Amino acid sequence: MGIHGHHLPQPPLPESKTRRNTVRSLYKALARGNLNTVGQLLDQELEWWYHGPPNCHHMMLMLTGKSKHRDYRFRPRSITTVGELVIVEGWEEEIMRAYWVHVWTVKDGQITEFREYFNTWLTVILQVPGEDGKENVKAWQSEPQQRLDWSLPDLVLTV
């Protein structure tokens, strides 16, 4: 509270934190089964890409309402912002050996693009301006690949 009990204006959040908060809100809404909030966070023309076993489209089934939030629980273990992307990863070792990475693009508070990688290690490469054109910079890599003794396919996503 500011002077005389009034709230002082808060400075705007950095864009990366705003994107991360949008994605966190989505996971919270999914966990509660709040499809109204989910619908407000997703762009009507959401672009979706999937890589993984054909029977593991868990997130898309939840986003479209074809599956309930109890059918599969996504528990994010890390949420990282890389440029315009918000990268979320999680894994389950006990119930079933499942590892997933979700890559979200958030623009103006709306999720416009979703890439789901299920049981696939992922490395994200950013192309940034360099002295001689574009340079590739490794920006992010699946965390548990070093800790879990699982054999999974490995993909490189260049943005």
Image: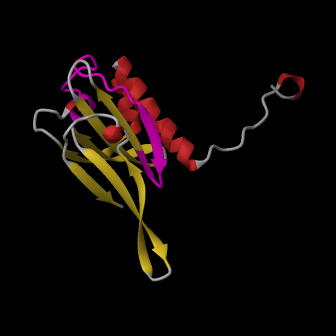
Residue at left 18%, top 35%?
57
Viewer-side residue, 77 vs 12: 77
Residue at 21% in and 30% down:
58
Residue 77: say if magenta. Answer: yes
Residue 105 in sight from this viewpoint: yes
Image position, residue 17 (x, y; %): 56, 42
- Residue occupying the far right of the picture: 4
Q: Position of residue 153 (x, y in %)?
A: 19, 47
* Magenta residue check for 30: no
On the image, which quarter does residue 2 sit in?
A: top right
Residue drawn where x is 45% and y is 83% of the image: 132
Rendered view: 25 above or below 109: above
Front-most of 111 and 158?
Answer: 158
The percent position of residue 101, horizontal first and vertical second, equals 31, 40
Q: Quadrant of residue 7?
A: top right
Range of residues picked out in magenta: 59-86
Residue at x-position 51% and y-position 36%: 21
